[in-house]
Structures are given as C-alpha cells and as structure tokens.
Amino acid sequence: MKQTYDSIYVKEYYEGYSIGVNPFSSSNFIQSSEAIVAGFQSGRSEYERMNGFLSGGIPNRILTDKILEDYLLAGMLGMSIDTLGYTPYQINTIVLWYQSGVEKYEPNQFDSLFGVLEELEIELIK
C-alpha cells in the first residue's frame, strides 16, 4: 500500500470513491491502481450502508449523508418527515437518523429561532 498522503494516491482514491458511490457504475477495473480499487470499495460500502445492496436493485430515490442530516435536523426541530418513494431499507436508515434528532429535541430551545424566522416573515412548511 502506498503512503496515503501521496497526492497521486489520494486523487486516485477519490476517483475510485466517486465511482463506488454511483450505483450505476460497475466494478470492472482493468489494471486499476490500488488506490482506485480501495476508493471504489469504500465508496460502494458507503452507498450500500445508506441504500442497501445493489443486488436488491437501485432505489428510485438515493440517500446521501446530506439528506440524512436533513432528517436528523427535522427530528431536532420536531418536524414531520416524508418517506414517500424510499425502500423499506432506506426508511429504516431514515428512522434511525430522525429518532436520533428527536432524542435531542427540546421544544424551548428553538423558540428564539422561530421568533427570528417569524420576524423575517419566513414560514416553515410542515
């Protein structure tokens, strides 16, 4: 294994990672570097952690860390969520993130935030 601080290794690793998180890409790497293969495996593992195995098919809506963070925030703010279009595996993942946010929810904590939003005439849609 090459030194992970080598700029070429890092570039190739992230190239492989981006291929791995894309469910429409394949793992056919002919004479690929060790960094690309390691990045691909890491990216594919990350994708499957959130969306389930590719052998189960590619879902209509794909979860990312950003989307999961939005569900965490929705739980912290006590907002309702929409899970329409997600697979049962993805809904289980969403529920874990949402519940984690609900556990951190304190209704009085966000009163000042809602007051500022109201002053700016910003309406939250539930």
Image (cartoon, grey):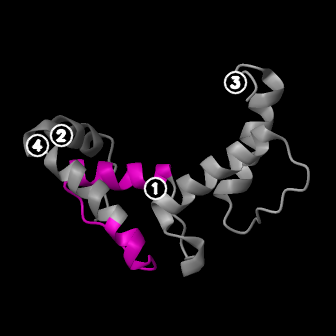
Badge 2 is on which residue? 110
Per the rendered image, the range of residues in magenta is 65-92
- First-in-chain label (1 vs 3): 3
Element under disc 3: loop
Local packing at callout 4 (Cα closer than 10 Å; few below 14, some 14-19, many 20+) is: few
Tell me the kind of residue under disc 4.
Glu
- Contact between labelled residues 3 and 1, with CB atoms less than 8 Å apart: no
Element under disc 2: helix
Location of the C terminus by quadrant is bottom left
Q: Which of 50 and 61 is in front in this view?
A: 50
Picture disc at residue 34: none
Tell me the kind of residue under disc 2.
Phe
Q: Distance between the residues labelled 1 and 4?
A: 22 Å
Evaluate whether residue 106 shows in this view.
yes
x then y, percent, for residue 40: 70, 50
Picture disc at residue 4: 3
x then y, percent, for residue 32: 86, 47
Badge 1 is on which residue? 67
